[in-house]
Amino acid sequence: MMPTTQAAKPGSSKTAPHVTAPPVDVPQVSAPPEMAMSDAEKREALVRIAAYSFYERRGYVSGHELEDWLQAEMEVNRQWVAAQEPKQTE
Protein backbone atom coordinates (compact mmCIF):
# COMPACT_ATOMS: atom_id res chain seq x y z
CA MET A 1 0.00 0.00 0.00
CA MET A 2 1.42 3.37 -1.04
CA PRO A 3 1.62 6.16 1.55
CA THR A 4 -0.75 9.00 0.83
CA THR A 5 -0.37 12.67 1.49
CA GLN A 6 -3.07 15.23 1.98
CA ALA A 7 -2.84 18.46 0.09
CA ALA A 8 -3.13 21.63 2.11
CA LYS A 9 -6.31 23.61 1.63
CA PRO A 10 -5.91 27.10 0.20
CA GLY A 11 -5.58 29.61 3.01
CA SER A 12 -4.72 26.91 5.51
CA SER A 13 -1.46 26.84 7.44
CA LYS A 14 -1.34 23.06 7.29
CA THR A 15 1.32 21.53 5.09
CA ALA A 16 1.43 18.06 3.66
CA PRO A 17 3.25 15.55 5.83
CA HIS A 18 6.75 14.65 4.69
CA VAL A 19 6.98 11.17 3.17
CA THR A 20 10.39 9.58 2.70
CA ALA A 21 11.14 7.01 0.05
CA PRO A 22 12.25 3.60 1.22
CA PRO A 23 16.01 2.97 1.02
CA VAL A 24 17.22 1.59 -2.30
CA ASP A 25 19.69 -1.30 -2.41
CA VAL A 26 22.69 -0.38 -4.53
CA PRO A 27 24.02 -3.37 -6.47
CA GLN A 28 27.62 -4.31 -5.85
CA VAL A 29 29.97 -3.89 -8.79
CA SER A 30 31.53 -7.17 -9.85
CA ALA A 31 34.48 -7.96 -12.06
CA PRO A 32 33.91 -7.86 -15.82
CA PRO A 33 32.90 -11.25 -17.29
CA GLU A 34 36.25 -11.80 -18.99
CA MET A 35 38.00 -11.58 -15.63
CA ALA A 36 35.55 -13.95 -13.95
CA MET A 37 36.01 -16.81 -16.41
CA SER A 38 37.31 -20.13 -15.15
CA ASP A 39 40.18 -21.92 -16.90
CA ALA A 40 37.67 -24.33 -18.47
CA GLU A 41 35.63 -21.42 -19.85
CA LYS A 42 38.76 -19.74 -21.20
CA ARG A 43 39.89 -22.99 -22.81
CA GLU A 44 36.50 -23.54 -24.45
CA ALA A 45 36.47 -19.98 -25.80
CA LEU A 46 39.92 -20.53 -27.31
CA VAL A 47 38.80 -23.83 -28.86
CA ARG A 48 35.75 -22.15 -30.38
CA ILE A 49 37.90 -19.42 -31.92
CA ALA A 50 40.42 -21.92 -33.26
CA ALA A 51 37.71 -24.20 -34.69
CA TYR A 52 36.11 -21.25 -36.46
CA SER A 53 39.52 -20.28 -37.80
CA PHE A 54 39.91 -23.73 -39.38
CA TYR A 55 36.41 -23.44 -40.87
CA GLU A 56 37.29 -19.99 -42.20
CA ARG A 57 40.57 -21.20 -43.76
CA ARG A 58 38.71 -23.95 -45.58
CA GLY A 59 36.50 -21.32 -47.24
CA TYR A 60 33.44 -21.81 -44.98
CA VAL A 61 32.82 -25.32 -46.34
CA SER A 62 30.56 -27.17 -43.90
CA GLY A 63 30.71 -30.83 -43.01
CA HIS A 64 34.00 -30.78 -41.08
CA GLU A 65 32.75 -29.45 -37.73
CA LEU A 66 33.96 -32.38 -35.63
CA GLU A 67 37.33 -32.44 -37.40
CA ASP A 68 37.74 -28.68 -36.84
CA TRP A 69 36.75 -28.97 -33.17
CA LEU A 70 39.13 -31.86 -32.46
CA GLN A 71 41.99 -30.14 -34.28
CA ALA A 72 41.27 -26.93 -32.35
CA GLU A 73 41.27 -28.83 -29.03
CA MET A 74 44.62 -30.41 -29.84
CA GLU A 75 46.13 -27.04 -30.78
CA VAL A 76 44.75 -25.24 -27.73
CA ASN A 77 45.87 -28.07 -25.42
CA ARG A 78 49.36 -27.97 -26.90
CA GLN A 79 49.61 -24.22 -26.40
CA TRP A 80 48.02 -24.41 -22.92
CA VAL A 81 50.57 -27.00 -21.76
CA ALA A 82 53.46 -25.05 -23.29
CA ALA A 83 52.32 -21.91 -21.47
CA GLN A 84 52.17 -23.77 -18.13
CA GLU A 85 55.69 -25.20 -18.40
CA PRO A 86 58.41 -23.17 -16.70
CA LYS A 87 60.82 -21.45 -19.04
CA GLN A 88 64.21 -23.14 -19.18
CA THR A 89 67.27 -20.91 -19.11
CA GLU A 90 70.63 -21.93 -20.45
Image (cartoon, helix red, strand yellow):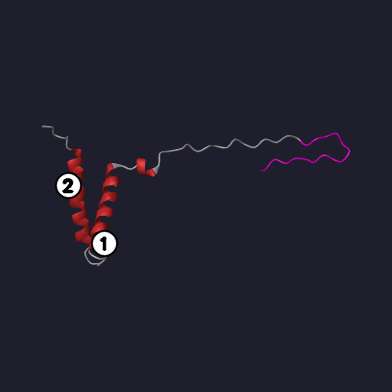
Which residue in the protein does label 2 denote? 78
Residue 42 drawn at (x, y percent): 29, 45
Q: Secondary structure at mark 2?
A: helix
Earlier along the polypeptide chain: callout 1 or callout 2? 1
Residue at (16, 35) in percent of width and height: 87
Q: Is residue 18 left or right of residue 47?
A: right
Residue 67, relative to residue 79: is it above or below?
A: below
Q: Nearer the viewer, residue 24 or 3?
A: 24
Residue 38 drawn at (x, y percent): 30, 42
Q: Badge 1 local density, few (<14 within 10 Å), some, or many (20+)?
A: few
Residue at (46, 37) in percent of width and height: 29
Residue at (19, 47) in percent of width and height: 77
Q: Is residue 64 left or right of residue 27?
A: left
Residue 1 drawn at (x, y percent): 66, 43
Q: Is residue 15 left or right of residue 38?
A: right
Q: Secondary structure at mark 1?
A: helix
Label 1 with label 2: CB-CB less than 8 Å: no
- Quarter of the image holding residue 60? bottom left
- Quarter of the image holding residue 85? top left
Q: Quick one: quadrant of the C terminus?
A: top left
Q: Which residues are magenta?
A: 1-16
- Quarter of the image holding residue 16? top right
Query: Is residue 86 magenta-colored?
Result: no
Which residue in the protein does label 1 denote? 56
Q: Amino acid at mark 2?
A: Arg
Residue 62, relative to residue 23: is it above or below?
A: below
Query: Is residue 10 magenta-colored?
Result: yes
Q: Amino acid at mark 1?
A: Glu
Q: Is residue 79 left or right of residue 11?
A: left
